[in-house]
Image (tube, helix red, strand yellow):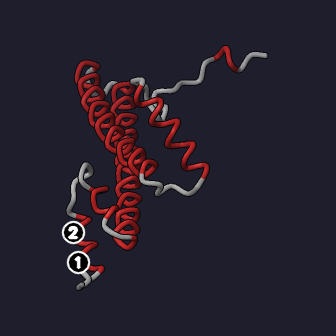
Amino acid sequence: MQRLPVEVAERIITNLSDKNLFIGSSVCRVWWQIVRQEAYKRWKKYACRIGDIYREIQAVREEERKGEIEWQKASYAVEELNNCMGTFAGNQVYIMNKMLKYEMIVDLQEREIIEYASSEFNWGGDPWRFDWEWNEWTQQE
């Protein structure tokens, strides 16, 4: 039986969609490791993109507060960015759940983060709590 070079396997896996990424993990142990590395890369990519979108939302809100743009235009922009962030969060939670299913998560803290995020996301919440605001009543004793 001939073996496929690791570089070719890596190239194949990097070109797979998120939905098909984990199919390769059942081929052999080497493919499982390559899929795990690619899944971590995509998890990080989505996390960075979600953070970038959040900063864009904050910038739009700041422009609105200063009066540089109209409130209606700002509202539409924030809504569109929130929709994008929700899509990226959904993709990220999907990858995290698949990694958990295929036992690619070994760290206990990562496992708890994934369980919390998927629970929040499945119930329609914001798993990363970007819209959280500090309430005055929580500071009172």
Q: Are marks 2 and 1 in contact (CB under 8 Å)?
A: yes
Q: Is residue 139 above or below residue 77?
A: above
Q: Amino acid at mark 1?
A: Val
- Residue sticking out furthest to the bottom: 2
Give percent across and percent down for residue 10. 28, 72
> Can you give x and y, in whole percent of width and height, for residue 101 in the image?
43, 48
The disc labelled 2 sits on which kind of residue?
Ile
Q: Height in image: 59 above or below 32? A: above
Q: Is residue 12 left or right of residue 116?
A: left
Nearer to us in this view, 136 or 66 = 136
As drawn, 49 above or below 116: below
Report the quarter where the C terminus lies.
top right
Circle 1 SS class: helix
Circle 2 is placed at which residue position? 12
Residue found 27% across the figure and 79% down from its top: 7
Residue under the image location 24 percent in, 84 percent down: 1
State the image coordinates of residue 82 (x, y, percent, origin top left): 31, 31
Q: Residues within 10 Å of mark 2 (few under 14, many from 20)?
A: few
Please give the label number shown on residue 8: 1
Give the mark count: 2
